[in-house]
Amino acid sequence: MKRRKMTTLVPLAAVAALTFIATALPVAHAEDSTDTCSVSTLKGAYSVQAQGTVISQLPNFPAPPFPFAEAGIDNLDGAGNLTGGVTLNIDGLAVQTNVAGTYAVNSDCTGTLSLTTSLGVPVNESIVVVSKERFIAVDTDSYVVVTRTMEKIRD
């Protein structure tokens, strides 16, 4: 009789102990579907890496099509303003330029970026915010096919 009670009590005690431990441990949650993005999601200095092809004639540029690449740093203020400096490689010619403009971020983590380079070239992009540390962009201008990746390097 004692043996039967013991075999019943041990599993019950184990279940009770596991239940107690499980309720005492911190719980990891998946991101809540109500989490949203805003312009303040992007704030700080971001490295910029881009590559693509210029497909339409731009003033003072070579005849298209020609390859394009870019590396630099953009500073986003968390209020929708952007400044920065980049080095462009335009068909093998390295050119440094400054940029200034604005950005917007929608609650679904999509957005837009519009800027002008010190060369006078406007840049318009659609962006997707991957996290506060990273966003990606594609040019929406008809003269270029370029994708960009921006990764946060400091606040």
Image (tube, rainbow, N blue to C red):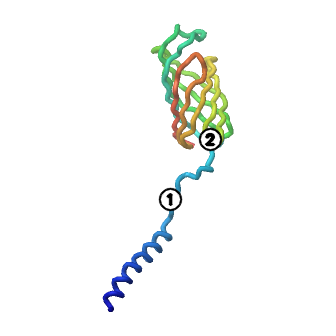
The residue closer to the viewer here, 14 or 52, is: 14
Q: Position of residue 10 (x, y in %)?
A: 36, 81
Q: How many marks?
A: 2
Outermost residue, top side? 63
The residue closer to the viewer here, 41 or 84, is: 41
- Side of 70 relative to 120 (left or right): left
Task: Tell me what residue is drawn at x 65 percent, y 39 percent.
Answer: 106
Q: Position of residue 53 (x, y in %)?
A: 50, 18
Q: Are marks 2 and 1 in contact (CB under 8 Å)?
A: no
Near mark 1 (Cα within 10 A), the count class, few <14, some 14-19 or many ≥20, is: few
* Vertical side of 23 occupied by 79: above or below: above
Outermost residue, left side? 3
Task: Tell me what residue is drawn at x 58 percent, y 16 percent.
Answer: 143
Near mark 2 (Cα within 10 A), the count class, few <14, some 14-19 or many ≥20, is: few
Query: First in sequence: mark 2 or mark 1?
Result: 1
Within the image, what quadrant is residue 141 found in? Answer: top right
Q: Position of residue 59 (x, y in %)?
A: 60, 10
Q: Amino acid at mark 1?
A: Ala
Q: Quadrant of the C terminus?
A: top right
Secondary structure at numbered mark 2: loop
- Side of 105 relative to 13 (left or right): right
Outermost residue, bottom side? 1
Q: Amino acid at mark 2?
A: Asp
Which residue is disc 2 drawn over?
Answer: 108
Q: Position of residue 40 (x, y in %)?
A: 65, 43
- Mark number, residue 28: 1
Task: Tell me what residue is drawn at x 55 percent, y 10 percent.
Answer: 61
